[in-house]
Image (spheres, rainbow, N blue to C red):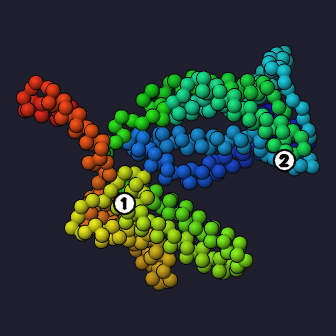
Amino acid sequence: MRILTESLHLHAHCQTGRVDRITPGIIAVFVGAVAGFALFVPFVAASYRRRGGLRFGRLVLWASALVYFWAIWAYTLLPLPEADSIRCVGSNLDLFELVNDIGGALGRPGPALTDPAVLQLLLNVLLFMPLGFFIRVLAGRGILVALAVGLGVSALIETTQLTGVWGLYSCAYRVFDVDDMLTNTTGAVLGSLLALFVPARHRGSGKSADAAEPRPVTRGRRALAMLCDIIAFSLVSATAGVATQLVLEAVGRGDLVLEAELSSILGTLVPAGLWLVVILASGRSVGDLAVQLRYRGGPVPTWLARPLRWAGGISGYVLLGALPTPWSLAGLLFGLATFVLLFTTSAGRGLPGILSGMSLTDAREGSSGDQSRNSRAATTSASTPTSSVGWSTGAKNGE
């Protein structure tokens, strides 16, 4: 994948103008952001179940990996030329041909680092170093896996180029080069070695030993639950709206006004109804489920407290906001109250807690993890030949 030199040749022979090497990066960031938006709630839920919580550093790493995934394809395949303006190119099947290229670069006057052959080698190595780094830090795999994945990804990209994007073009417009696969794989291995400098406790995807232990309920955690509700609600709403439009088009009722009205109505009612079902069944919203929060207790009976918890969440805000003016202003007041109460109520239990009369707790309190911990403590206590006072002090100090 001749990132620098082929881009120059490509635009010297195609009617697409000057190469804008920033555009593929912008595309990668945009597509990565869209994918990250869709995957955010599942990622948060997985983090709370595998590692006990969400760590900012790990979130940044996964977000970087997502953007990097798209950047690889963007920088190796884009910009796509016009089909009638491509220049067919050959292949390099001579392994270590790069040695001759580097030798020629060293023999020419001027700095070697500015030579296209040297730059191509360095860029191919650098492009795949993050891959090996992410494989070790995020997946917990070592050099052999980095080597295999690096070689596999590079081979897939080179084959995509060789086949003219799998038949999209009549011939290859970028050179298939086995040396590129060699340098890419080398970059993945070097990235894996570089990841060894990251402390072992921060590497891998295994489940933390204390993942099931309850954590303090903070306003930040409650805010994260609210963010998860907003994102998940928006995705369900958008899906319902698009599905409505597709159905209307399929049955031949492609009236724009009808599409807009039904899409808006179903885009509000479908997610609100789904949230009601989830809360009635579990007592928790999608966001609560993601961050392991639960509303408990209170003087209000469960059959009434859960609908009130639903009404005090995002569904109440959206339904009020969907009312015709001036009643829709109630949605604005609802949102303002939600924001203020997040910071003024105990543990950020907010409007749902006030309406339902329930307290906000960690959903893992009283879970099997606590029971197993208590069981281990009881077993140790029974087998320790000390007085009950002495053991109680030791347990307290060891907490």
- At which x and y percent is residue 40? 51, 51
User: Of discs 2 and 1, which sits in the foreground?
Assistant: 1
Q: Residue at x 44, y 76 (%)?
A: 320
Mark 1: secondary structure: helix
Side of 59 where 22 appears, left or right: right
Q: Quadrant of residue 5?
A: top right
- Mark 2 or mark 1: whose residue is earlier in sequence: 2
Mark 2: secondary structure: loop
Would you name the residue on which mark 1 appears? Answer: 282
Side of 68 where 181 appears, left or right: right
Q: Residue at x 46, y 48 (%)?
A: 44
From the viewer's perspective, is residue 334 above or below residue 378?
Answer: below
- At which x and y percent is residue 185? 68, 26
- At which x and y percent is residue 397? 18, 32
* Residue 191 visible (yes or no): no
Q: Amino acid at mark 1?
A: Ser
Q: Which image quadrant: the N terminus?
A: top right
- At which x and y percent is residue 146? 61, 27
Q: Which image quadrant: the C terminus?
A: top left
Q: Residue at x 84, y 24 (%)?
A: 93
Distance (Cα) linking label 2 and label 1: 49 Å
Closer to us: 368 or 64: 368
Side of 163 where 191 appears, left or right: left
